Amino acid sequence: MKNFNIESLIVYGLCPSCRQMAPLVSILKNIYKCTECEEELEQYVNGVIKYLPMSNKKLKKELIGKNK
Ligand SMILES: [Zn+2]
């Protein structure tokens, strides 16, 4: 069994949904969930790291894409 370090999956970021610095849990590559408001966020790295709200539709698409 692989060692699982939960701390590596949590980052602090400014959540665009509840507008506060909140612990964000990585649920997929580049996709995080705000622990405050449970909004799913997509991480964009373009010089600075940004988190954008993501619709469930898009998340589903992302998950389906990964299964291909
Ligand atoms: Zn939030």
Image (cartoon, rainbow, N blue to C red):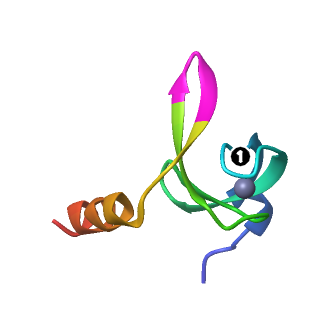
Q: What residue appears at the point 53 percent right and 28 percent down from the top-left corner?
A: 45
In the image, taking residue 12 as reference, residue 39 lies left or right, namely: left
**Amino acid at the residue labelled 1:** Cys
Task: Give the SS element for disc 1.
Answer: loop
Q: Residue furthest bottom?
A: 1
x then y, percent, for residue 18: 75, 52
In this rendering, the answer to whether 2 lies above or below 53 is below
Q: What residue appears at the point 61 percent right and 76 percent down from the top-left corner?
A: 2
Indicate the quadrant where residue 4 lies.
Answer: bottom right
Q: Which residue is mark 1?
A: 15
Q: Quadrant of ligand 1?
A: bottom right
In the image, taking residue 63 as reference, residue 32 lies left or right, namely: right
x then y, percent, for residue 58: 33, 58
Q: Residue furthest left?
A: 68
Q: Residue furthest right?
A: 21
In this rendering, the answer to whether 23 lies above or below 1 is above
x then y, percent, for residue 7: 80, 61
Q: Residue furthest top?
A: 47
Which of the image's four quarters has the N terminus? bottom right
Q: What residue appears at the point 32 percent right and 68 percent down from the top-left corner?
A: 60
Indicate the quadrant where residue 38 lies.
Answer: bottom right
Q: Nearer the viewer, residue 7 or 51?
A: 51
The residues colored magenta run 45-50
x then y, percent, for residue 28: 49, 61
Which of the image's four quarters has the C terminus? bottom left
10 Å crowding of disc 1: few (<14), some (14-19), many (20+): many
Q: What residue appears at the point 75 percent right and 68 percent down from the top-left corner?
A: 6
Q: Is mark 1 within 8 Å of ligand 1?
A: yes
Look at the image and say whether residue 14 sits in the magenta stretch: no
Q: Main secondary structure of the magenta part?
A: strand
Look at the image and say whether residue 48 sits in the magenta stretch: yes
In the image, taking residue 18 as reference, residue 42 lies left or right, namely: left
